Amino acid sequence: MGNHVIYQASTMIALLSGMYDGSVTFGELKKHGDFGIGTFHQLDGEMIAFDGKFYHLYPDGSAQQVGMQESTPFSTVTFFEEEKTFQINRTLTRQQLEKVLDDLLDSPNIFHAIRIDGQFREVNTRTVPHQQKPYKPFIEVTKSQPSFHFPNTGGVIAGFWTPAFAQGIGVAGYHLHFINDERNGGGHVLDFIVDHCTISICSSEDFQLALPHDQEYLHANLEVPNLERDIMTAEGAY
C-alpha cells in the first residue's frame, strides 16, 4: 500500500448544504495533486484531472483546460502513482467493472485513486449547472442537471474509492468523472459500458482535509438528516 496523501477541499456535506463559493484556487489545489475530481465556483460544471492537466467539464457538455485562477468549493486530488494495473479485454457494464475493482482494492477501509483508460460502447454523464445566489440546496440543483450520452468513444475515467466511514466528508464508494479522448466533452459518470480498458490504482492511508474559513461556512448548520439518501440522490444512484 502506498503513502500517497489524498487532499480534499471542503466536504460533501457542505456542498449538499449549498456552499458553492470557491474556497481554493486550482493553482493552490495543483500543489497537492496532479489527479482528481471536483467542481467549480458557483457549481459551474465538473472537474477532472490526470497527468497534471485539469479540465473544466461545462454544463453544456463541452470541456477545456482549467485556468489556475479559477476556484473550487469541493475537490479531491492526489499525486497519482500507479501501484496496480489490470487489463480488461471483455465488455463490462459499470456494475460489473466495479465488482472487478472491488477485488483489486487493497482494502475497502482506505482511500484509492482510480484511473480507467478505455474504449467505451457508451458513457452517460451529468454536469451540474451554474448557480447564482441565493443558492439552492444541491439536491434541488440536480433535479435540473443536464445529462449527456457519449456513444462509441475512447476516454479516461478518473475518481476515487472512499471508505464508508467517510460518507459526508466525501462520497462513499466509487465517485467517477469522465472525459473523452478529444478532451472536448465529459462529466460526472452515471453509467457506462466499456469494451476494453486498462485500470490503474493508487492507494492511500493519508487524508488531508482543508475546510473553508469564511463566515458562511463557520456559522452554517451542516446537519443533514437524510445524509445517505441525499448523497445517493445527488450522485445519480436513485
Image (spheres, rainbow, N blue to C red):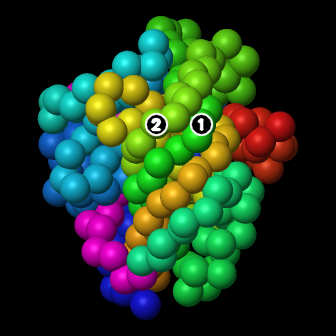
Instruction: Determine the image quadrant of residue 62.
Output: top left
Kindly check if marks 1 and 2 are in contact, taking CB atoms under 8 A apart as contact.
yes
Q: Secondary structure at mark 1?
A: strand
The mark nearer the N terminus, 1 or 2, is 1
Q: Mark 1 packing: few (<14 Cα in 10 Å), some, or many (20+)?
A: some
Q: Amino acid at mark 2?
A: Thr
Nearer the observer, 198 or 7 = 198
Q: Mark 2 packing: few (<14 Cα in 10 Å), some, or many (20+)?
A: some
Residue 101 image point, x, y percent: 61, 71
Using the image, determine if residue 45 lies above or below residue 28: above
Residue at 41% x, 56% y: name it.
Answer: 117
Point out which mark residue 122 bears.
1
Nearer the observer, 184 or 32 = 184
Q: Label 2: which residue?
A: 153
Side of 165 where 225 appears, left or right: right
Residue at 67% x, 63% y: name it.
Answer: 98
Using the image, determine if residue 122 lies above or below residue 201: above
Residue at 44% x, 24% y: name it.
Answer: 45
* The C terminus sits in image quarter: top right
**Residue 80, magenta (yes or no):** yes
Side of 194 where 94 appears, left or right: right
Whole-number angstrom distance, CA of label 1 to CA of label 2: 7 Å
Q: Which residues are magenta?
A: 70-84
